[in-house]
Amino acid sequence: MQQILSRILIVFIILNFSCIAVWEEMNRLSLKEIKRKGKLKVITSYNANSYFIYKDQPIGYEYELLKLLTKDLGVELDIEASSDLANLDYKLNSGEGDLLAANTIVTREKGRQLKFTEHLMTTTQVLVQRKKGFIVRKKMTEYIDNTVDLIGKTVHVRANSDYHNRLKKLQEELGGTINIKPIPENITTDELIEQVYNGEIDYTVADEQTALINNAYYSELDISLPISFPQKIAWVVRRNSPELLQFVNDWIDKNQNKIKEVQDKYYRKSRNYMQELKIESKPKSKKNISAFDSIIKEQASLLGWDWRFLAALIYQESRFNPSAKSWMGASGLMQLMPSTAQNLGVSIGEIHDPRKNITAGVKHLKYLDGMWKKTIPDEDERVKFVLASYNAGQGHVMDAMTLARFQNKSPVKWDKNVAEAILLLSDPAYYNGYGVKYGYCRGIEPYKYVQVIIAKYNEYRESVKK
């Protein structure tokens, strides 16, 4: 029996490597041929680190690096964002792409069939907790600065997640019990991190990059304690692409400064920008809100909005700073993305001009209002969809409506319906399925965006005359 099993295993290994050899022969493509075709086909996935859509523009840490790489290679970037995470390796080996860039962790097993490039960065799982001395809900939780101190503590993580598995292994390593509290899989890591900030739970776990992005919004959180060994993140090519592998490795080696700049943009500058936006601004008098009130009043009338509502949106976007520029590249009072501004008739050199920026922003709002009017006739309800679309892009809002239908909720009501569904778009279990077309979205942003603008508008209504 043992001999039969051994023979079956040998046959399986031979067949496996034979399939790889056939794939390699069929999909052999030299660097010269890639240049002749004029494009590099890259397979990626929707997530916070690789590739996602923000205000209808593609962005992401790996996406920006790929743009730099293909520019130096002298070809166009041809991106395929796939939701089929289980088959990304197959897609690469079968020739659907030349390179895989999907926040991939370097493993020995994957390295048997594919080739990893030099690593772009390292990641680790970290404990998310409130900073020492940060009091919320009239309590100050014990600060953990050593994994040993997790023994006896309650840590909330999604059931069956990598974080859950890591905590179980950590228990064995520590020789003590951590009270691992598994929560439903439809609760996202972003939501758990916000719960830590709000004092609803004391501890959770996230990968370092996700924790850094969230730390931009919640600076009172501490993410400094690693609970796993560092792991390398790299790109992947087929084994029969030695020239491409060498080019990419040389590029990574020569462009460490550029790579660090992009890392800083996504994982550190975002934090500085969000802190700038936390500076509060009160109306100067009962008549004025900002130095741009006359323009705001004029443009709000074109929308049919109370001018104080438009002022609340502009406050949330830029704190009335016409020179504001976000870490993602949005600029001016209404934080227009450069390509959006150009489509609305505003050049890059004019994007910080208050009148032109507000005029263009209002044109975009009017377009969104007209688009949603076909589906949502109620004005009070529709304005929430307009706000969410202005923040995240209408594609993500349409995806949230699709998810709402799957959950037997109303796709044309925001509060407790589409608003709840949009939170799920930061969870791969949802943004990679259920008919979702536009992939990952940090759903908590549009969710809160709608809330805070309406709250700011109500504040202005009480303090500023119409």
Image (spheres, helix red, strand yellow):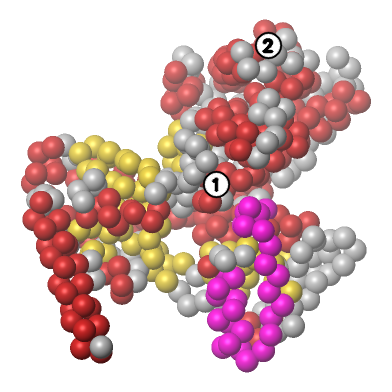
- Magenta segment: does it hold 182? yes
Q: In front: 82, or 331? A: 82
Tag 2: Cα neighbours inside 10 Å, few (<14), some, or many (≥20)?
Answer: some
Residue drawn at 39 percent across, 49 percent down: 84
Question: In terms of secondary structure, where does tag 2 sit?
Answer: helix
Magenta region, residue range: 163-191
Q: Is residue 285 visible?
A: no
Residue 206, by quadrant, is bottom right
Q: Residue at horizontal 21%, vertical 77%?
A: 8
Coordinates of residue 183 in the picture (x, y in percent)? 68, 62
SS at mark 1 in the image: helix
x then y, percent, for residue 152: 74, 83
Amino acid type at circle 2 is: Leu
Measured from the top left, where is residue 355 in percent x and y?
60, 16
Cα–Cα gap, marks 1 and 2: 34 Å
Identify the image quadrant of the C terminus: top right
Q: Is residue 246 left or right of residue 443?
A: left
The residue pinned by badge 1 equals 430
- Amino acid carrying mark 1 in the image: Tyr
Check residue 102 in the rendering and tell me which mark sits there, or answer none: none
> Which one is in front, 277 or 429?
429
- State yes or no: residue 29 in magenta: no
Q: Tell me: 35 left or right of 280.
A: left
Query: Which residue has dot 2 on it?
Result: 303
Disc 1: CA contacts within 10 A as few (<14), some (14-19) or many (>=20): many
Q: Nearer the viewer, mark 1 or mark 2?
A: 1
Front residue of 447 and 288: 447
